[in-house]
Amino acid sequence: MSRHTFAGKAGTTVAIGWDRPLATFFVQVLRPHRTMKGEDETVEWQGTEPGELPTAAAAIAVAAPYADLPETLGATLETDRLKTVATSDGPAQIAARPFLKRS
């Protein structure tokens, strides 16, 4: 799994990366919780289902409204994905497969 974090707009934090076991890119946008000190509130979270965001471009499209992202991010995310192509599932991923929803 890869994860890149960026300071977002309006006090948010944007995390974007590749999740190999789910074969999806993901985007998580958080902001400090208004009433619970030290806690974060989820604004957006996509890429939690297998294959939900199949391309770096799809993930960037979700994240772009929340942060100014570097122009090289697409290439970085695709490189992250390609680094995992030859990786196989371990015992934990194999055991979790029956519990995952498949699209």
Image (spheres, helix red, strand yellow):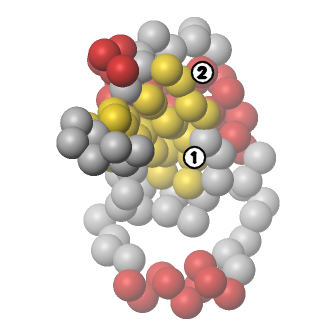
Image spot of residue 40 (x, y percent): 35, 44
Image spot of residue 82 (x, y percent): 71, 44
- Disc number for residue 73: 2
Give me the residue at 57% from left, 9% from top: 71
Give me the residue at 60% from left, 34% from top: 4
- Residue 8 located left or right of residue 3: left
Give me the residue at 38% from left, 84% from top: 99
Image spot of residue 86 (x, y percent): 78, 60
Callout 2: helix, strand or loop? helix
Neighbours of disc 2 within 10 Å: few (<14), some (14-19), many (20+): some
Image spot of residue 98 (x, y percent): 42, 88
User: Which quadrant of the figure has residue 32?
Assistant: top left
> Which residue in the protein does label 1 denote?
18
Comparing 77 with 32, the one in front is: 32
Tell me if residue 68 can be seen: yes
Quarter of the image that includes the C terminus: bottom left
- Residue 96 located left or right of residue 40: right
Neighbours of disc 1 within 10 Å: few (<14), some (14-19), many (20+): many
Mark 1 is on which residue type?
Trp
User: Which quadrant of the figure has residue 89?
Assistant: bottom right
Please identify the residue farthest to the left as the structure is shown: 35
Mark 2 is on which residue type?
Leu
Position above or below: 95 against 42: below
Which callout, 1 or 2, points at the residue further toward the start of the chain? 1
Position above or below: 14 against 19: above
Position above or below: 69 against 36: above
Tell me if residue 64 can be seen: no
Callout 1: helix, strand or loop? strand
- Disc number for residue 75: none
Comparing 77 with 85, the one in front is: 77
